[in-house]
Image: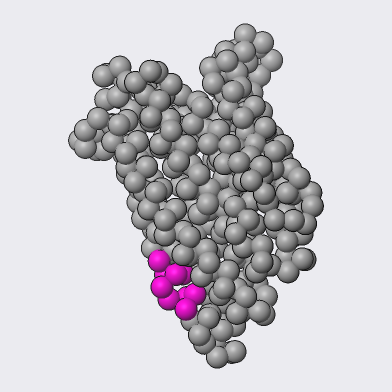
Amino acid sequence: MTVGPWDVAALAVKAILYGATLGAAGGLFFLAYGASLLQPIDRVSIRRRLAILAVLSIAASLARILLTAASMSGDASGMLDAGLLALVWHGGEGRSVLIRAAGFLLAAPALAADRRPGVGAIAGAAGAATSFAWVGHAHGDDLRWTAVIVGIHLVAAAFWVGALWPLRFLARGDEAARVAAAAVRFGNAALAAVSVLIAAGVAVLGTLLGNASALWRSDYGRTACIKLTLVACLLGFAALNKLRLTPRVAAGAAGHRAAAARALRRSIAAEMVLAGAVFLATAALTTLTGPAPAAEHGRIRCMPWC
């Protein structure tokens, strides 16, 4: 596997694209179920951050098209090659960008006004999160279910990672009881989301690899193992937050609550770093490698996210 500088640039931009898109979508989910626990000034700060992430998502989407064209040509001239750009756009990236943009446009009213995101905003956030499932070779007559499962996986991932920054933001203050209430509410809902995330991810990975031996016999499988290891570490921090740190914030004395809130903030920061590493590994899976066993069986060459 030869990796050039344009491939590295495309890889980095795609990781940013994952983070910005899923962060913005999941943040909207957080505002929908956690709005009652937030002060007006908190909601303003969170909405401003989510709007920045949504704009970054669209900018990264366009940058990815340019960099993919450059990677195909081997130099910067590809960014100005109308034929290559059209090839990338019509190869699925254009459809993905349009769905992503439409989703954030639908969610824009919830980011512009201090109100709980409604059905339209939630649908828009979900649409933006699932936009990655529209790229790849998962749309054959016998593969539509795979794209659906990828979409479910993406929504569950957005629900999880999109809540991390808002929770860390809340944990900075002195109102430990409110922080604990928000963390408990998220933790209870996240149990179902993480279960769906894991089940959908395993199902799609099994479809892509064809057999377990591909995990160590192919570049795709080895990269998937790296991603799975990072996800396992992420789950460890999530369990620490739910089972130990959040109860300490909720039940401790005033002084102990503040210390527990600081520990929770540090743990969430570690989760965010690990989530970024997962995005980078995922970008490598969908940019630099492909599931060879699936290709040999005529099913899929590459799938986004998983």
Q: Please tell me which residue is depicted at 53% across the width and 67% down the height of the picture.
A: 185
Looking at the picture, how far across and down is residue 263, in whole percent? 53, 75
Res 293 visible: yes
Residue 172 position (above or below residue 198): below
Decide if residue 83 is on the left or right side of residue 202: right
Residue 163 position (above or below residue 80): below
Decide if residue 91 is on the left or right side of residue 140: right
Q: Please tell me which residue is depicted at 58% across the width and 27% down the height of the picture.
A: 96
* Colour theme: one colour
Q: Please tell me which residue is depicted at 53% across the width and 81% down the height of the picture.
A: 250
Total count of labels:
0
Find residue 13 and report its image quarter: top right
Find residue 202 and report its image quarter: top left
Numbered range of the magenta stretch: 239-247
Decide if residue 169 is on the left or right side of residue 180: right
Res 14 visible: no
Locate the N terminus by quadrant. Answer: top left
Query: Is 300 part of what is drawn in magenta?
Result: no
Locate the C terminus by quadrant. Answer: top left
Of the pair 224 and 6, the residue shown nearer to us: 224
Q: Please tell me which residue is depicted at 74% across the width and 49% down the height of the picture.
A: 111
Of the pair 27 and 185, the residue shown nearer to us: 185
Query: Is 243 part of what is drawn in magenta?
Result: yes
Looking at the picture, how far across and down is residue 244, in whole percent? 43, 76
The rendered magenta stretch, by its main secondary structure, is classed as: helix
Residue 123 position (above or below residue 239): above
Residue 298 position (above or below residue 116): above
Of the pair 111 and 97, the residue shown nearer to us: 111
Looking at the picture, how far across and down is residue 216, in whole percent? 24, 38
User: Residue farthest to the top?
Assistant: 83
Looking at the picture, how far across and down is residue 283, in whole percent? 48, 36
